[in-house]
């Protein structure tokens, strides 16, 4: 073998790359001091792109296929190297293989709660998590703005930054969407799509796109969950008065199961009366203007104007303390008046009709 043959054997004639890790985004082909022979074969596989860089400037980008490296298919690099007349000589250039496949199963989540203003319950803290996919859409921008001269750039080096973008943009979109807390579960798809569009605008300069952005769960603090459950119990009961009675009954049952709390049972009677009064005050304010239940409506006992029912023959309402329908009392001495009486039998004061 002559000197020229040995010299030609130093030139690189085949350029190709196979990713054994499936986690590499950018791989720099090891040209080192060797030169690339004009007419060399370049193999770019599916889900790959080959980027030629000359003196720090991104030149030609080759898509999947078999390419023969000549001045005819390297217009930018030929111009940078001054091959105006098709000079067929070996050349030096940095060659980067970029993995353009879809990276799936990437997870994102909020490390700290997002504070949003709910239109129904006011400010509330939310946590969210989900999954996303990404891929390289512009290999030249990725090398220019992110990978740089890194000979082996992996997905782990950028996923952290991607998650930061996602949490920030998702929080911004969720707060501006003003979706009520009780409707969030039905809006996961809309929130995910809105967040994906906001993220896409930031990642376009990096040459990366996010085809899928999924919201798997949005949760609230435990104390807010307890308040929501309590509200649901009240709505299921349908009557705040009955709900208070139910809660009082539960407290009595719990006290009976715990002998050490027997002394606390002395205050249950007073607490029950106070709870009843509070329940009726809330019910009266919420149902102001509503028609009172008529006397003699369907159901046992006698109905009071507050809506509570009392045993037959009761003269005072056990819920609000007012006289039940059919009972009259003198406003001066308090003696009960006989049916049809026009004057009090105790003091002679005129009675209202």
Image (cartoon, rainbow, N blue to C red):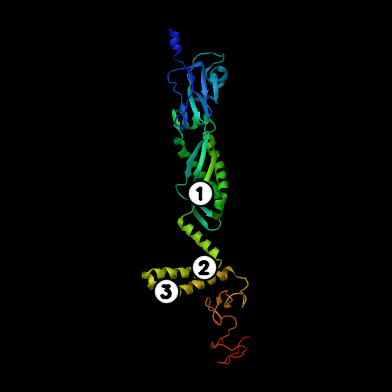
Name the spot of residue 308 as percent of width and height, x first. Answer: 56, 74
Seen at 55% across and 51% down, the residue is 185
Q: In the figure, 174 relative to 162: above or below?
A: below
Q: How many marks?
A: 3
First in sequence: mark 1 or mark 3?
A: 1
- In the image, which is nearer the foreground, mark 2 or mark 3? 2
Residue at the spot of label 2: 243
Name the spot of residue 311 as percent of width and height, x first. Answer: 54, 79
Residue 208 falls left or right of residue 261: right
> Looking at the image, can residue 131 be seen?
yes
- Per the model, the C-alpha gap separating discs 2 and 3 is 19 Å
Residue at the spot of label 1: 217
> Looking at the image, can residue 178 be seen?
no
Residue at the outermost top position: 2
Q: In the figure, 22 relative to 271: above or below?
A: above
Q: In the figure, 212 relative to 311: above or below?
A: above
Name the spot of residue 338 as percent of width and height, x first. Answer: 59, 89
Which quarter of the rendered picture does the C terminus lie within?
bottom right
Name the spot of residue 295 as percent of width and height, x first. Answer: 61, 78
How crowded pointer 1 is (Cα within 10 Å; few <14, some 14-19, many 20+) is rated as: few
Name the residue nearer the viewer: 242 or 342: 242
Per the image, label 3 sits on a secondary structure element best described as helix
Q: In the figure, 298 relative to 14: above or below?
A: below
First in sequence: mark 1 or mark 2?
A: 1
- The numbered dot on residue 267 is 3
């Amino acid at each position: 073998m002559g000197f020229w043959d040995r010299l030609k054997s130093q030139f690189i004639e085949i350029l190709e790359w196979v990713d054994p890790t499936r986690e590499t985004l950018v791989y720099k082909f090891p040209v080192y001091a060797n030169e690339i022979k004009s007419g060399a074969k370049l193999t770019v596989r599916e889900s790959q792109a080959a980027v030629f860089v000359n003196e720090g400037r991104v030149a030609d980008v080759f898509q999947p296929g078999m390419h023969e490296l000549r001045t005819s298919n390297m217009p930018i690099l030929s111009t940078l190297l001054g091959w105006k007349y098709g000079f067929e000589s070996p050349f030096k250039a940095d060659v980067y293989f970029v993995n353009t496949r879809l990276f799936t199963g990437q997870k994102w989540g909020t490390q700290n709660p997002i504070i949003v203003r709910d239109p129904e319950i006011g400010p509330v803290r939310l946590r969210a998590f989900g999954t996303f996919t990404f891929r390289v859409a512009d290999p030249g921008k990725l090398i220019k703005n992110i990978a740089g001269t890194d000979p082996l750039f992996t997905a782990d080096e950028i996923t952290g930054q991607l998650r930061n973008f996602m949490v920030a943009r998702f929080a911004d979109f969720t707060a501006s969407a003003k979706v009520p807390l009780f409707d969030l579960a039905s809006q996961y798809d809309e929130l995910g799509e809105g967040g994906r569009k906001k993220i896409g605008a930031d990642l376009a300069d990096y040459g990366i796109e996010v085809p899928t952005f999924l919201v798997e769960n949005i949760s609230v603090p435990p104390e807010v969950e307890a308040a929501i459950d309590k509200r649901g119990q009240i709505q299921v009961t349908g009557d705040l008065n009955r709900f208070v009675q139910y809660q009082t009954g539960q407290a009595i049952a719990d006290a009976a199961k715990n002998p050490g709390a027997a002394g606390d049972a002395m205050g249950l009677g007073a607490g029950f009366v106070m709870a009843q009064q509070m329940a009726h005050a809330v019910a009266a304010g919420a149902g102001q203007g509503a028609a009172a239940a008529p006397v003699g409506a369907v159901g046992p006992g006698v109905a009071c104007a507050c809506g509570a029912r009392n045993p037959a023959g009761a003269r005072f309402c056990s819920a609000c303390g007012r006289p039940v329908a059919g009972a009259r009392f003198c406003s001066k001495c308090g003696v009960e008046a006989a049916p049809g009486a026009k004057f009090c039998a105790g003091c002679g004061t005129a009675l209202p009709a």
